[in-house]
Amino acid sequence: MDKKNTNLGNWFIDQLNVYQSANSDAQSIKQNFIIRREEFELIIDSMKTKKANDPIQHELILGRRGSGKSTLLKRIEIEICENEKLSKRFISINLAEEQAGVYRLFDLWEYVLDELRLKLTEQITLPDYSTFDDDQEYTHSLYALIHAICKKHKKKIILLLDNFDRIVENFTDDGNLLRETLINYSDVQIIAGSTRMDEHFWQYDKPFYEFFRRHRLEALSRDEMQLLLLHWSDSLGISELRKFVLGSPGKLENIRILTDGLPRTLQFFIQIVLQKTENTSYQYLKKVMDNVSPVYQERLNYLTPQLRKTVLEMAFIWEACSTKQLVSKTKMQSKLISANLKTLADKGIVDVVPTAKKQNLYRLSERFFNMWLIITQGNPEQKRKAKWLSIFLENWYDAADFKKLTEEHIKNLKSKNINWNKALIHSKALSQSKYISVVDRDSIIMLTEDLKEPTLQSSFLELPRKFGEIGTEVSKAFAAENYQRVVKLLEEVENEAGGVKFLGLGLAYHGLKEFRKAEKYYILAIENGSEVPFSRFALIYQDLGDVELAEKYHLIAIENKDLDSLNNLAILYDNKDEFYLAEKYYLKAIENKDKDAIYNLALLYDRKGKHELAERYYLMTRGNQRFESQNNLANLYSRQGKFELAEKFYLKAIKGECSVALFNLAKMYEENGGIELAEKYYLKAIEKKDNNAYYNLALMYYLNNISKAKSLELVRESNVRVSDDIRKSLQILIEIWNGVFDDLEERANRLLVAAKGRDMQVFLLELLNHQQKNLVLKFFSSQEFGELLKDKYLVVYYVAQLLTKTVEENLDLKIPPEIVLTVHAVLESVKERQAFYGYI
């Protein structure tokens, strides 16, 4: 370690008087008052321009510990004392030290009178407390004395109170008394500092509701930080600091993020710069943690238990989190968590992160405070999982620095030129960094494990799992198409260099059909050094329906010899019904030995009626064990009337576990009169849970007037599995066939109302086949849809009338001559079916 630089860093901290900067001499405070000038000038200008009889404007300065409240109050005090115009009108009293002893209002007035005695060098005797009946009477007496002194000297008091929130929280009725006094008398103007927007200032029934003009000390901006650091460099004569500020803007911005722009925490990070910490980052990180502990511990202790619990759980989550996450972690009610978050946001401890949805996210404002909480308040498990070392380094170094650090550390590990404890800290930080590759990750972990001696105690710092172990599980999850598992596993991996993690996530989200996420991770994979085939992008855009982009990337992929795109581009053209282009690229893919393209081309030819070509390419797939192709070829032969060949290939497909072939073979047997064989294969298809097989077998039994009970069982199961109007109509008919008439009219009526253009003639005729002529005539008489039925199914209407016993007079003469023959033919058919079902 460079002793000179170490001493410089320590000297720097000493010079800045970190914790008690407001106690520096007046000249130093004025010289170093670089930030918070806007608030200072606003308050001072208000005092300068205010006339004697103008109402008093009380001021409240809000800011976190270390934001500069005390220094601002001190600077205001100095200005009042040194400015001739102000000093003639005002007496400044700064109770920075004494305010801890104020818990009653008369305590405050006693301190004020003590200060007046010193500042005015006159004898002031306090009244005897024991002579008063109660505290309030004594308090009035003290203020009367203050009022008399102000009147005598023709001056008003500027009362500067730090940590005012602590004072007012001690008050009960004294708060109302103070407000009443300040309203009725214009002797005292309060300029107060507070770490929080206490309920006394915002709750309408509290004494100081809308009583103060508020000034919030926000985090330092980038320009303010640069201005402050350059001032420190010049005033303290530290050229190294100026060189850093002007030469490392990225690192400077990272410091601002880590400290959330708080001047006090900023000082400790500058100490690292001055001590050449590129070689000693970890040691100085620990030192900074030790230095800020008094500040952070006070901040934590000052919170109520429920606020403290909320802050701690947010710290352990680390990333921006939702109210729902905090409810789960804290086991508090959602309303309470929401109230806690609002309070913490008002205090400046929590940032609200708006989202596109109604629910916001939340995180701790100061990232270094978050880091400190994990290190000092977390249990071993939380510390083990935490990435705080990596986060620190990633905010401190850029990618090039990280590469250099990683190479140097691996070199030291290989040469064993580093002890176990130090190696573990370095390896923990580097192995979980986004800046290194998974190869470097595993190298660091393995080399570090080799250093450990059996006698050494295990540290709470544990190394992450090697990517090799995670990768094995990822491969198994991909093989099982468990893409959610892949995503979960890859989220364990922090390393982004090389893009392996992002490529895996892209593939996983593609499998999950979350195409926009897949696109995002493919792009990240490329940006981080992984080669993602253009064909993957083409498939993404194809799945998103962006045909032009899909076509573009398929063609680029083909130009780059990514021949997997040949078949996919052909599919794209196939879907667009561009036959010749689809055929062209399927043939090119086949030349490239793409087996899927053979099957796809066969399907294309089959759809286009090119049966000889379809047959040729279906047959070419036999060696590929493509059994769905055997099924399609059988369908082709069946349509051509080549039943023996069709049966042969259906049986081949069935042997290859192509279950749809069972249904298709059963249907072919049924269409050709092979009822027993059809029944056999429909039942086999039902064993494979083929939904259509339930319906078709029920229909076959019904049309052939066999197995009534089985038919009813099958059609009901069919409607449970897939319910539509066709299946519902068949169920009604089979129930009538089985003598079941439950809600018959109502259910049939609903079907006819819902038909909306579908042909219901078969259903109406089947009702007549089962002697439901009166029900059918009732439908034709319906006010709701009767006339529409007559227009569409006039033949059925006349047949239903002819089947009734009381035939309308001269009905035969009324039937239009062009349909008379049709009506009588249908009538004879109905009578035949009625006889077939045994009704006549």
Image (tube, grey):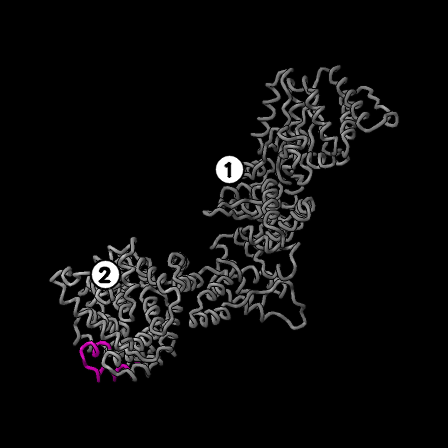
**Measured Cα–Cα span from mark 2 to mark 1:** 57 Å
Q: Residue 533 location in percent, x, y?
A: 33, 63
Q: Depth check: 545 or 794 in front?
A: 794
Residue type at mark 2? Answer: Lys
Residue at 81% across, 29% down: 135
Residue 46, placed above or below residue 452 = above
Q: Residue 79 location in percent, x, y?
A: 64, 25
| In this rendering, position of residue 582 left or right of residue 136 | left
Q: Which residues are magenta?
A: 635-653
Q: How many marks?
A: 2
Q: Are marks 2 and 1 in contact (CB under 8 Å)?
A: no
Our reading of the magenta stretch's main secondary structure is helix
**Residue under numbered circle 2:** 576
Residue type at mark 1? Answer: Asp
Q: Residue 712 location in percent, x, y?
A: 37, 74
Q: Secondary structure at mark 2?
A: loop
Q: Secondary structure at mark 1?
A: helix
Of tags 2 and 1, the one toward the viewer is 2
| Res 328 seen here | yes
Q: Residue 530 location in percent, x, y?
A: 39, 62
Picture quadrant of residue 40: top right
Q: Depth check: 137 or 783 in front?
A: 783
> Which quadrant of the rendered structure holds the N terminus?
bottom right
Magenta-span inclusion, residue 794: no
Looking at the image, the residue that sits furthest to the left is 817
**Residue under numbered circle 1:** 223
| In this rendering, position of residue 589 left or right of residue 126 | left
| In this rendering, position of residue 209 left or right of residue 562 | right
